[in-house]
Amino acid sequence: MLRLELVDISKQYPGVRANDGVCLRVEPGQIHAVLGENGAGKSTLMKIIYGVTQPDSGQIRWDGRPVSIGSPVQARALGIAMVFQHFSLFETLSVAENVWLGLASEPSLDAVRDRIRQVTGEYGLELEPERPVHSLSVGERQRVEIVRALLTQPSLLILDEPTSVLTPQAIDKLFVTLRKLAASGCSILYISHKLEEIRALCHHATVLRGGRVTGEVEPSAASNADLSRLMLGGEPPRLERRARAPGEPALELKSLALPRSGLYGTPLVGLDLTVRAGEIVGVAGVSGNGQRELFAALSGEQLRGATGSITLFGEDITRAPPRRRRALGLRLVPEERLGRATVTTLSLSENTLLTRTEAVRRSGFLDRLGLAALTQKLIGHFNVKARGPRATAQSLSGGNLQKFIVGREIDAKPRFLVVAQPTWGVDVGAASQIRAELVRLRDAGCGLLVMSEELDELLELSDFLVVMAGGRLSPRIATADAEAQQLGEWMSGLWPEAPNDGAGAQHAQA
């Protein structure tokens, strides 16, 4: 008997047919991938299964009988749990309180804390139950969602991009967990754009394109190229890089130190780093080791550093407000795309206006036609699937919103770009496009600092790498000389003490 069967599921939104006669069959104990490019209808389909969204037509069968899932409460009563790509957490509550609210039964909060410690220890998903969610990085929030779902002991677990901001070590541990769940009879619906993961983990895959099923495949018997062709209709272009002599120092950190911000913050300890014009430096590391604090110091959200500890093109910006930094050519893409990079209820045009001022006239009045034209240009150039400049940020799929945010800052022609998790939740084609745009910036003389928990991404993009652990930065190493085992050791803070100003690497390159 099938655990879940979808029969001719359709869902229409204004101007978009998200699902068009979708059929899907999931067996007990099966890890079933759902593949497709951004906007293919995957997340809509998962929300229908979880009761967040109601289909216009079609039937859902659970354990062989027709069911109507009108809400997540009804879904959880059936034994369905879901980990959303965009987190559904209360930021002012603790980890334990968020997990507690998601449980159908009524254990005590103390019992939930103990269970969290047991599960996180067992599966290597480190979390402090008492820590408030607002103090967590994106990767740590992902862990909260996964742990909350695991504690419900589901019969069907839906995972929407669960590894998008997890390190390779955490992904390996999660896969062990998922295989254990499947062996116990739990079915898993797994959405990911990481094709290697799909091939390594999943028993079966259903491919969507434009809201329709375009094929089914056994992932272990298919190549990445095969899966890409099913998803996109072709293979994404390879990233082309050419050697380029770096320019003068663009960003310099000189013994940058910041005290712990709040009880659960990570202090920055004497950071030294040089990033030159025309080079990409990648920052690797496990989430929660000071990346958020470093980003805040660079963006101007945190102004407590000592004078002279951050310079941009020779000017001390340690205490400079964000407007001054932007005037010098600094642009930033934060990891939190909802609520920080965008305001969810505002239109794409209004979100463009958050960081782009071309449409603001000297008189202070807004050129609305010019703003709409700029936004449409971003939508077109970066292949964002949206209903136009008036579409709200929250109406876009996660990957399409990410393309819009990254495109907004790249199109501003920055002199220096700081970007965190550049391809979080985007399909292989969009990821290829974003990485190519970052390399074009570098070739045009822009300096880039890229923070990512995808080590493969950093190895593909970066000219040099540093590792962040415990609020400290490792020595800078040329990507060509980096080895996965060495970087793994450095992620634990185990690196040789050495000057970290990049001079040695520059001389070596020369």
Image (cartoon, rainbow, N blue to C red):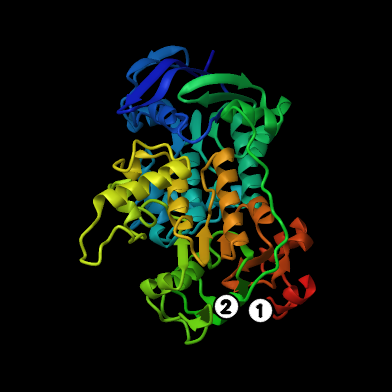
Identify the element where label 2 is drawn: strand
Residue indicated by mark 1: 501
Q: Give how far across and how far down residue 446 sits, in percent.
A: 56, 65
Q: For the point 43% across and 61% down, which residue is it?
A: 131
One can see residue 31 in this view: no
Asked if residue 134 can be seen in this view, the reply is yes
Specify the amino acid type for callout 1.
Answer: Asp
Kindly indicate the quadrant of the structure image that contains residue 475: bottom right
Q: Quadrant of the N terminus?
A: top right
Q: Residue at x 46, y 64 (%)?
A: 331
Which label was assigned to residue 416?
A: none
Tell me the crowding category of disc 1: few under 14, some 14 to 19, or many 20 or more residues within 10 angstroms, Cα based.
Answer: some
Image location (x, y in percent) of residue 276: 62, 72
Instruction: Read off the residue under disc 2.
Output: 252
Residue 115, image x, y percentages: 49, 48
- Helix or strand or loop: what does disc 1 sit on? loop
State if disc 1 and disc 2 touch (CB < 8 Å): yes
Image quadrant where residue 273 sits: bottom right
Pick whichever, 129 or 278, lies toward us.
278
Image quadrant where one finds the C terminus: bottom right
| In the image: residue 450, left or right of residue 404 | right
* Residue 494 to residue 482: above or below: below
